[in-house]
Amino acid sequence: MKSFKLIFEEFFDFGDRFAFDMLDGFQYEGYPFEIFDDSFSFHIGGPLALDEPIIIKFEDVNMNCLYFVKFRESGWKRAKWDDNTKKWIITFNT
């Protein structure tokens, strides 16, 4: 099984802006800063964003709800790591 750290390193290479759901249903959108062994720092985007990045634990993220967008492409995409096929499944978010 691929580690959460490696999954998020790869995921954060897919786009320019990211969104994900937490297991408690809350959603974050913004930019990653640093990836640690059990978590990552994330800066929330928008006018009401905090000055400092927040720390997100891997275990609290809903791994079925990872989204990214590239600035030169239109539309958000959903990314899901499939541990059975050892491949990322990328679909347009509709």
Image (tube, rainbow, N blue to C red):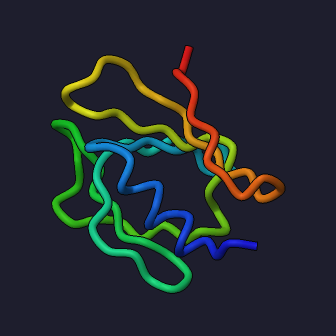
Residue drawn at x 27%, y 23% as measured from the top left: 73
**Outermost residue to the top:** 94
Where is residue 49 drawn, in percent x and y? Answer: 23, 47
Q: Which of the 4 image quadrants contains residue 80? A: top right
In the image, residue 86 sits, relative to residue 5, either above or below, namely above
Query: Between 41 and 14, which is closer to the camera in this rendering?
Result: 14
Where is residue 50 drawn, in percent x and y? Answer: 23, 55
Residue drawn at x 33%, y 43% as measured from the top left: 15
Residue drawn at x 44%, y 82% as measured from the top left: 36
Q: Is residue 24 left or right of residue 5?
A: right
Where is residue 81 drawn, in percent x and y? Answer: 66, 52
Q: Is residue 79 left or right of residue 29?
A: right
In the image, residue 6 sits, relative to residue 73, either above or below, namely below
Query: Between 5 and 2, which is closer to the camera in this rendering?
Result: 2
Q: Quadrant of the C terminus?
A: top right
**Outermost residue to the bottom:** 37
Q: Is residue 35 left or right of residue 70?
A: right
In the image, residue 32 sits, relative to residue 24, either above or below, namely below
Q: Which of the 4 image quadrants contains residue 83? A: bottom right
Q: Quadrant of the N terminus?
A: bottom right
Where is residue 85 drawn, in percent x and y? Answer: 78, 53
In the image, residue 11 sits, relative to residue 19, either above or below, namely below
- Marks counted in the figure total 0
Residue drawn at x 55%, y 71% as measured from the top left: 57
